[in-house]
Image (tube, helix red, strand yellow):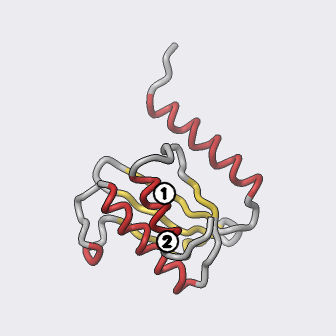
Amino acid sequence: MANSKRTLFLKRRLRVRNKLRKVNAGRIRLSVHRSNKNISCQLIDDVQGVTLAAASSLEKDLGVVGKNNVEAAAKVGAALAERAKKAGVEECYFDRGGFLFHGKVKALADAAREGGLKF
């Protein structure tokens, strides 16, 4: 029986996250979510269960509302890196979820790296 796209995505997300948890215990997690219309990311401290910084293409001050392209992802990544510095975060690990590390997700990661985050 064929699996649906959603089921395959959820299995891939769990596989990626569980592998990352084993290797990066105690570190801050940079979690990415991409929809058809927007892209967002958060820096999450899983030990305390709090979000330290977040950025999204829904924010009006980034100037990319309603756009979901590589340029918008790069702006979101740069904004997150800036907010991470203010929160005192320099190192994290990149949790791509079930998304492929290609296109928008890669652009967000590269912009965050250029902004000073290490992962």
Q: Residue 45 carries which label?
A: none
- Kind of residue at badge 1: Val
Residue 85 placement, left or right of 5: right
- The front one of 50 and 36 is 36
Name of the residue lying farthest toward the top:
1
Residue depth check, mark 1 versus mark 2: number of the one nearer the observer: 2
Residue 5 position within the rendered picture, expressed as x and y whole percent measured from the top left: 44, 30
**CB contact under 8 Å: marks 1 and 2:** no
Residue 32 screen position, x and y as percent:
48, 57
Residue depicted at x 54% and y 83%: 85
| Residue 54 x, y percent position in the rendering | 46, 71
Q: Mark 2 points at which residue?
A: 114
Give the spatial CA distance, label 1 vs label 2.
Answer: 17 Å
Amino acid type for the residue under numbered disc 2? Glu
Image point (24%, 58%), residue name? 67
* Residue annotated with mark 1: 32
- Residue sitting at 71 percent across and 54 percent down? 21
Callout 2: 10 Å neighbours few (<14), some, many (20+)?
A: few
Q: Is mark 1 on a helix, strand or loop?
A: strand
Left or right of 59? Residue 34 is right
Disc nearer the start of the sequence (1/2): 1
The local secondary structure at tag 2 comes to helix
Percent position of residue 96, x then y: 54, 52
Quadrant where the image shows the C terminus: bottom right
| Residue 33 quadrant | bottom left
Q: Is residue 80 above or below residue 12?
A: below
Q: Residue at x 30, y 54 (%)?
A: 69
Q: Which residue lies furthest to the front in this view?
A: 114
Q: How crowded is mark 1: few (under 14 residues within 10 Å), some or many (20 or more)?
A: many
Q: How many labels does the image show?
A: 2
